[in-house]
Image (cartoon, rainbow, N blue to C red):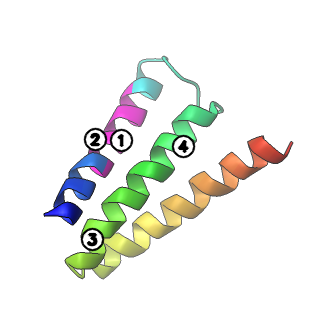
Amino acid sequence: MFTQVCGWFGMLCILAAYFLLANEFVQSRDILYHVMNALGSLSLSLDLARKRAWPALGLQIVFILIALSTVCRYVLV
């Protein structure tokens, strides 16, 4: 049950980030956009790991790494 809630939360975070970007509430360079994507992918990954959905989990891990590397670049600069 917990991982299902994480999966739904992650999906909503990713969709909200995309909605905000598509409607120009945030820019692709805004840290909020990348934090929302990282948090969403991480949460969704918990549910995918429980379900052993390895290809989708691999994709989410790549998305997490991309988002976190961008966040780190903003924080460290």
The CA span between labels 1 and 3 is: 16 Å
Residue named by callout 3: 48
Q: Is residue 14 magenta?
A: yes
Relative to 35, 75 lies left or right: right
User: What residue is drawn where x is 41% and y is 56%?
Assistant: 41
- Answer with mark 4 or mark 1, whichever residue precedes in sequence: 1
Q: x%, y% of residue 18?
A: 40, 34
Residue named by callout 2: 12
User: What residue is drawn where x is 58% and y is 25%?
Assistant: 27
Q: Amino acid at mark 1?
A: Cys
The CA span between labels 2 and 3 is: 15 Å
In this picture, which residue range is highlighted in magenta?
10-19
Q: Residue farthest to the front?
A: 2
- Answer with mark 1 or mark 3, whichever residue precedes in sequence: 1
The CA span between labels 2 and 4 is: 13 Å
Q: Amino acid at mark 2?
A: Leu
Residue named by callout 1: 13
How crowded pointer 2 is (Cα within 10 Å; few <14, some 14-19, many 20+) is rated as some
Q: x%, y% of residue 36?
A: 47, 41
- Answer with mark 2 or mark 4, whichever residue precedes in sequence: 2
Q: Residue farthest to the left?
A: 1
The CA span between labels 4 and 3 is: 20 Å
